[in-house]
Image: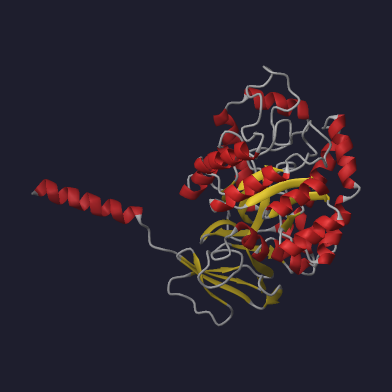
Amino acid sequence: MRRALLVACLLSAFSASAAPAPKSYVLKAARLFDARTGKLVTPGVVVVVDGKVSAVGAAAKTPEGARVVELGDATLLPGFMDAHTHLTGEAGVDWRQDVIDSLQRTVPEQTLESLPRARATLMAGFTTVRNLGAADFIDVGLRNSIRRGTVVGPRMLTATAGLGTTGGHCDDGNSWRKGVLADETGAGVADGPEALRAKVREVVKYGADLIKVCATGGVLSLNADVGSPQLTQAELDAIVDEAHARGRKVAAHAHGAEGAKRAIRAGVDSIEHGSLLDDEALELMKRKGTWFVPTAMAFQGVKELADKGSLPEENVRKVRTVEASREQVLRKAISRGVRIAFGTDAGVYAHGRNAGEFALLVQAGMSPAESLRAATVHAAELLGVSATLGTLESGKLADVVAVPGNPLEDIRKTQAVFFVMKEGVIHRDDTAPSSTPR
């Protein structure tokens, strides 16, 4: 009897320690960005209870025992979203060394190296990302560990291996002789509609939240020219049909106009990069409601690598090709009302610099408010998470960031995030005494 009572007491104590009391916060700043309207609200007040937004605005009541966080002359915004990242990789200063490292480092090593990248992304204010391609299901493991709270990082939607054809941009073994690489071809490579349909099923089986397909050549691969189409209409139709049947969206890497138009006709949800799109492609996107993720930071990052001599000459030529047209395409897309979501291709440049995309969007003609909406309410729609994220409204997950001053007056304020909350947990607060980001 005494032993049973002791065990019961121990179990009770364990249960109490395993379920800490829920926390509540009142976040206060000079202003708040309403992502639905694109306007500022003053003052900025967000009440957070149990990881969700419970109230917004000056009239919101402070819950008993809530911690009040005074952020001063700052703007509260929904957590930023990046619809195109590669957290499992990052370009180095020497592409040859990158190749050697990829051959010599084990999967566990490559996984561990992704942890500081995930952390840097979150600390920059990006609480949700879409990871468009990774090897060995490292992205799935990273996503799951972040969900469990064992790793600090943004919420992730993962594509696992990008799908493509033999010798195409998604073929990681392209240009290498047999035996040089452990894998002679990319994990997502297949040829023909039914073979690619099977690949969709395979990546979904192993945890893909969405499908990424390489519809054209690319800048950093060693295959064809950057604009060449690489899948037939029938192949793209099969991929999109299977993905949508299984409740997965499709993101299409596409620089060239013809490959992009095939992808748009097939019904892909987004076109990534789009540096060589023509007027017909843009009109088709607008008519079908296809999202454009322009990844301006990717082009800046690749240009930086080219200028440093960190790329093969073949890739440098491709950089020069896309640089001549990519901003013109983006300007046209903005002026014509093509739906644009924020995405950067982080990994081409150092993770944590994602917010640089805001200034590049504004430089191309987008208003500061619309650039912020691209990374919040619009990105949430593309990612399919609008019910819980993208705006600061009652009932939504408490993903909140703060930047100094007014980002509508100076969009570069987004590069100075100093407060980050994800689902009611404060990961960064530079105003707190002896602040140490979690």
Instruction: Residue at 79% x, 31% y: name it.
Output: 223
Instruction: Residue at 77% x, 29% y: name it.
Output: 95
Image coordinates for residue 215, horizontal then vertical, percent: 73, 43
Location of residue 45 with respect to 254 vertically, above or below: below
Image coordinates for residue 387, horizontal then vertical, percent: 54, 66
Residue 383: image quadrant is bottom right
Q: Total number of numbered labels? A: 0
Residue at far left of view: 1
Residue at far top of view: 179
Residue 354 in view of the camera: no
Of residues 230 and 307, the one drawn nearer to the viewer in this rendering = 230
Of residues 152 and 281, the one drawn nearer to the viewer in this rendering = 281
Q: In the image, 6: left or right of 275?
A: left
Location of residue 256 with respect to 333 vertically, above or below: above
Q: In the image, 414: left or right of 114?
A: right
Residue 105: image quadrant is top right
Instruction: Residue at 50% x, 45% y: name it.
Output: 144
Residue 321 in view of the camera: yes
Residue 42: image quadrant is bottom right
Image coordinates for residue 194, horizontal then vertical, percent: 60, 39
Colour scheme used in the picture?
secondary structure
Of residues 303 and 163, the one drawn nearer to the viewer in this rendering = 163
Residue at far bottom of view: 59
Location of residue 124 with respect to 114 vertically, above or below: below
Image coordinates for residue 54, horizontal then vertical, percent: 50, 72
